[in-house]
Image (cartoon, rainbow, N blue to C red):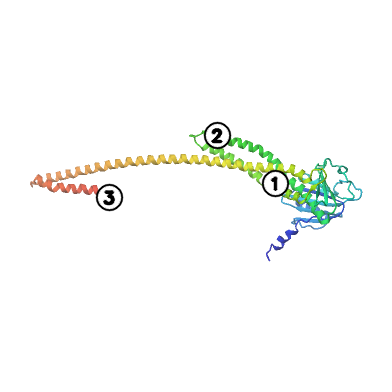
């Protein structure tokens, strides 16, 4: 059996929902997992529950003071969801249990989402959303009309978003799944929106980068005969700053896209239908959430497009510099060719002069030889001397010329 067989198979059972029936409260909190917040909370839960927990597990469900608490690890955040049974005639929106409130108070700086879901039965709910403190709420029939969800998406002074679920025919399994979807929509929506402040900040930087790129493009078009080195340095600086900005935002924008897909998928799984004349819950969320996702995607696309434009300008300028270098090389080769031609002409002139000089020396030697013979008393006819020494001189000069030609050819 493959060593990962059991682990991979059990992914089918990962992250189960809390299944329950009857009126209840669900207190849900999501924390950014920074500086070991997740491990700190898990250790505190171990102490409170007086039971060992697997700190390496992705999720767990424990009993805490008679209530059910579920914790989950995620890539960037950590969630706590506590199920509290609703007492008859209890207040609509109670504070979280003390043990949970204590954990939340100690990690307020990384709290990204706080939601309170009230599950009421169709026979016991007040019949009017105003009784629950909602102002102009959005509502939908979900699960094929087996439940109704209401919320005005306004935060309480404590920063809690409240949702009311009126259950008609959902059993414990479907009710657990439905409330889980609602909580995931809120949590993943907040996680996706984390990139919005970054996108707004990058928008100002990109505007400055685009203005700088326009100036560099104008300089490149006007500077036809100047050195491209200053422009190359400016473009390299712009490219480095743009790459640093892109590296800072790439992961955040990718996470936003992934979280947004989950939100859209969970809204589709609600299977909403209209309640009277109220705006549907999913429509309310999408009309305000989609612009955020699209704005972040537009900034990301704008960043990529700007990087491509800078790269194209850089390539254009480098091509121009390369052409100038090739022209300089061509001029140098032409100069070398002219110099070589002059050297060949000089060499030919020297060779001609050398032959003349050698011929003169040979003739002078013949003359001295004839004068020496005449001094010894041997008279030599000029015709005979010319007939003998003339061809000999020609052969010697010809041999020298042939030798020079052979050396040049070699």
> Quick check: 91 left or right of 177?
right
| Residue farthest top in this picture | 222
- Residue 365's spot in the image, x, y percent? 17, 45
- The residue shown at (34%, 42%) is 340
Q: Quadrant of the N terminus?
A: bottom right
On the image, numbered disc 2 is attached to which residue? 218
Q: CA distance from mark 1 to mark 2?
A: 36 Å
**Element marked by disc 3:** helix
> Compared with residue 169, is residue 246 higher up or lower down, i.e. above or below?
above
Q: Earlier in the sequence, mark 3 or mark 2?
A: 2
In this rendering, does residue 388 appear at all?
Answer: yes
Circle 3 Cα neighbour tier, 10 Å, few/some/many (<14 / 14–19 / ≥20) = few
Q: Earlier in the sequence, mark 1 or mark 2?
A: 2
- Residue 158's spot in the image, x, y percent? 82, 42
> Quick check: 190 left or right of 367?
right
Residue 406 is tagged as 3
Circle 1 Cα neighbour tier, 10 Å, few/some/many (<14 / 14–19 / ≥20) = many
Residue toward you, 305 or 409? 305
Q: Quadrant of residue 310?
A: top right
On the image, numbered disc 1 is attached to which residue? 256
Residue toward you, 105 or 280? 280
- The residue shown at (71%, 41%) is 291
Q: CA distance from mark 3 to mark 2?
A: 61 Å
| Residue farthest right in this picture | 89
**Element marked by disc 2:** helix
């Amino acid at each position: 059996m493959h060593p990962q067989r059991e682990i991979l198979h059990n992914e089918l059972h990962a992250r189960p929902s809390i299944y329950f029936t009857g009126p209840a409260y669900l207190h849900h909190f999501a924390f950014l997992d920074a500086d070991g917040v997740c491990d700190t909370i898990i250790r505190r839960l171990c102490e409170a529950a007086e039971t060992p927990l697997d700190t390496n597990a992705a999720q767990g469900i424990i009993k805490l003071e008679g209530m059910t608490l579920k914790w989950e690890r995620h890539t960037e955040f950590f969630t706590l969801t506590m199920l509290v049974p609703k007492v008859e005639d209890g207040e609509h929106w109670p504070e979280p249990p003390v043990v949970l409130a204590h954990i939340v108070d100690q990690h307020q700086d990384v709290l990204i989402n706080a939601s309170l879901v009230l599950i009421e039965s169709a026979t016991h709910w007040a019949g009017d959303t105003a009784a629950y403190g909602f102002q102009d709420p959005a509502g939908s029939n979900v699960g094929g009309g087996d439940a109704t969800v209401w919320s005005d998406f306004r935060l309480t002074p404590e920063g809690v978003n409240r949702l009311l679920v009126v259950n008609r025919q959902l059993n414990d399994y479907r009710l657990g799944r439905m409330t889980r979807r609602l909580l995931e929509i809120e949590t993943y929506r907040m996680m996706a929106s984390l990139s919005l402040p970054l996108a707004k900040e990058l928008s100002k930087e990109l505007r400055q980068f685009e203005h700088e790129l326009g100036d560099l493009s104008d300089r490149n078009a006007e500077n036809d005969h100047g050195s491209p080195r200053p422009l190359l340095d400016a473009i390299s600086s712009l490219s480095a700053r743009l790459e640093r900005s892109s590296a800072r935002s790439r992961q955040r924008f990718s996470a936003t896209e992934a979280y947004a897909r989950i939100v859209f998928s969970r809204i589709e799984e609600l299977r909403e239908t209209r309640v009277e004349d109220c705006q549907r819950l999913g429509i309310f969320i999408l009309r305000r959430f989609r612009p955020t996702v699209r704005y972040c995607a537009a900034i990301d696309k704008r960043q990529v497009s700007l990087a491509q434009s800078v790269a194209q300008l850089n390539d254009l300028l480098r091509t121009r510099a390369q052409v100038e270098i090739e022209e300089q090389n061509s001029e140098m080769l032409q100069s070398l060719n002219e110099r070589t031609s002059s050297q060949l002409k000089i060499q030919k002139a020297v060779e001609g002069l050398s032959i003349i000089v050698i011929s003169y020396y040979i003739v002078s030697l013949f003359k001295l030889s004839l004068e020496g013979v005449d001094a010894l008393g041997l008279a030599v006819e000029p015709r005979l001397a010319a007939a003998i020494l003339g061809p000999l001189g020609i052969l010697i000069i010809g041999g020298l010329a042939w030798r020079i030609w052979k050396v040049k050819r070699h």
